[in-house]
Amino acid sequence: MPDWTVLVPLKRLSAAKSRLHPPTMTVPRESLALAFALDTLHAAANCPAVGRVVAVTADPAVREAVAGAGLDAVDEGPRPGLNEAIRHAAARLRAADPAAPLAAMTGDLPALKPGELAEALARAARLPRSFVPDAAGTGTVLLAANTGSELDPSFGPGSARAHRASGATPLDGLWPSLRRDVDTRADLAAAGSLGVGRHTLVLLLRARRCNVGHHAGHRGHVRPPNPYRDRLPR
């Protein structure tokens, strides 16, 4: 079977992760959103089942960062909305390679492990159309369409139910890093416990240093252990 092409739709940074309260003011929400996206893209690019990763975005800053990372990016197209952006990009890619299996994946999976994505795509390769629910079970982190099937995305609130209703088969493997999307600070803590990618880790360490520095002036303060010490990039 041909390698998968994975589309990763990314919002403009000014509108991304509106529910996420950064761990410190020194780490803006926009910076975290971009770090999540880059770590997601890098993990997908290192997945052995993936032949190409394409970011879908209208944000010039995101396109520049993606290009700087050596990855591809395409524009969202003329119609607004996440699902329309995915449809536009999928149509372009299928026109160039009608036999290519396609997947759309959210760009907020900073703990994503390539092996888990490979396992999910191996399962998806046996089905016409399938999806992986998020950790809560209500959203979707991955939607896959095999050769001859259309993605027909319905990302958004309640997308797991919508994708199931449209005929996609749910994949229920134990893939904690794939299912761990990040919308809130609690989600970010859960992703951190799984081990996040380099871009996100740098920001978390910066936030921790700032928080420690803020409290260091208080008498009797004891510097806490660094929970990310063993996850520093080598």
Image (cartoon, grey):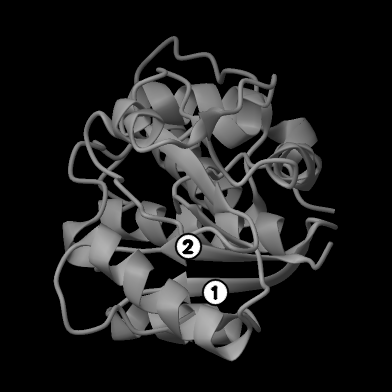
Kind of element beneath mark 2: strand
Which amino acid type corresponds to the residue marked 2 in the rendered image? Val
Left or right of 85: which side holds 157?
A: left
- Residue 100 or residue 174, whichever sits in front: 100
| Residue 227 visible somewhere in the drawing | no
Identify residue for label 1: 54
Residue 88 image position (x, y, % from top left): 34, 76
Q: Position of residue 81 (x, y in %)?
A: 18, 63
Say above or below: 2 vs 145.
Answer: below
Residue pictured at 43% horizontal, 84% vertical = 74
- Looking at the rendered structure, the kind of residue marked 1 is Val
* Crowding at mark 2 (Cα within 10 Å: few <14, some 14-19, many 20+): many
| Position in image of residue 58 (x %, y %) | 27, 80
**Left or right of 109 on screen, residue 136:** left
Residue 163 falls in image quadrant: top left
Vertical placement of residue 225 versus 168, above or below: above
Q: Name which residue lies at 36% across and 64% down.
A: 10
Task: Kindly check if marks 2 and 1 are in contact, taking CB atoms under 8 A apart as contact.
Answer: yes
Residue denoted by label 2: 8
